[in-house]
Image: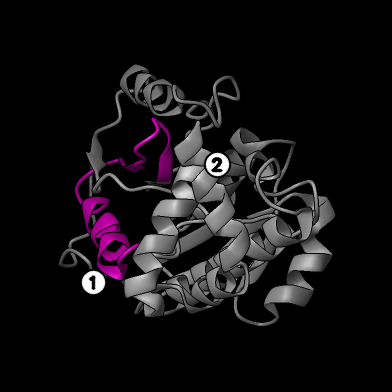
Amino acid sequence: MERSSQPSGQLPECKRTLVIMAKAPKPGVVKTRLNQYLPSSAVTALYRCLLEDTVALATSLSSVEVAAMCPESDQDDLVHLLGNAVTVVTQKGEGLAAGLTSVFRHFTPGGRHVIAFNSDSPHLAPSVLNGAFEILATHDVVIGPTQDGGYYLVGATADHPSLFDSNGMGTTSALDRLLMRTRILDLSTGFTETFYDIDVASDLIQLGRELQFAPAKAPRTAAWFLEWRQAVAQVHDRMVST
């Protein structure tokens, strides 16, 4: 497959696009697996901090266009929340698979290298995102695996409508299903380092420990941990006792 003759990582501005998979921070809709441990208001505030820190991470990258992909019902709220920081685009269809398919259908025309990035890993090193774009210089697809069997980013240089299967999205088999599709489609695939996102209580505790020593990685989220430190301590105690 042909690749740009420009050096790796040196695609012109707007040829590299990072798309954040976002939702509006609404109670009962975001980070629902944490609702059994924390008040709904705390969970909603946490997601808003994660999202805003993720946008800050994305916009810190050089020569990268940043956008957000969201359900149609969330567009107005996200435009109000994010302002002019990113372009907010609505997906076609319902669910994460439809959202990811929409990302590459919308953004890859014109030879752009596109990465879809989750909205709850703002503590990721910027070098990992830059490295993912470099991988796309020599591969059809790049994947950032998570420790729980999913993935925190996926990138491609073209639209592959059948790449994402709605079955298994958000489960421990999500990565395996994606890799099966890349093999069926005969797409060369590279990988970034394995990382973690924030889905369950153990993820929350791990992130709290990390940000305690390095709050600048995600300052809004670090401030959330300070505000809700007693509630988070109770989450930790519940986990230890079970």
**Residue 71 visible in rendering:** yes
Q: Please name whichever residue, 110 or 207, is drawn nearer the observer in this view of the structure.
A: 207
Spatial CA distance of label 2 from label 1 is 48 Å
Q: Is residue 49 above or below residue 19?
A: below
Q: Is residue 161 above or below residue 66?
A: above
Q: Which residues are magenta?
A: 124-152
The residue depicted at 54 percent of the width and 68 percent of the height is 225
Residue 150 location, x and y as percent? 42, 34
Residue located beneath label 2 in the image: 238
The residue depicted at 23 percent of the width and 46 percent of the height is 2
Q: Which mark is residue 10?
A: 1
Is-magenta flag for residue 139? yes
Q: Are marks 2 and 1 in contact (CB under 8 Å)?
A: no
Hey, what amino acid is under mark 2?
A: Arg
Residue 65 location, x and y as percent? 47, 71
Residue 92 location, x and y as percent? 72, 42
**Residue 117 visible in rendering:** no
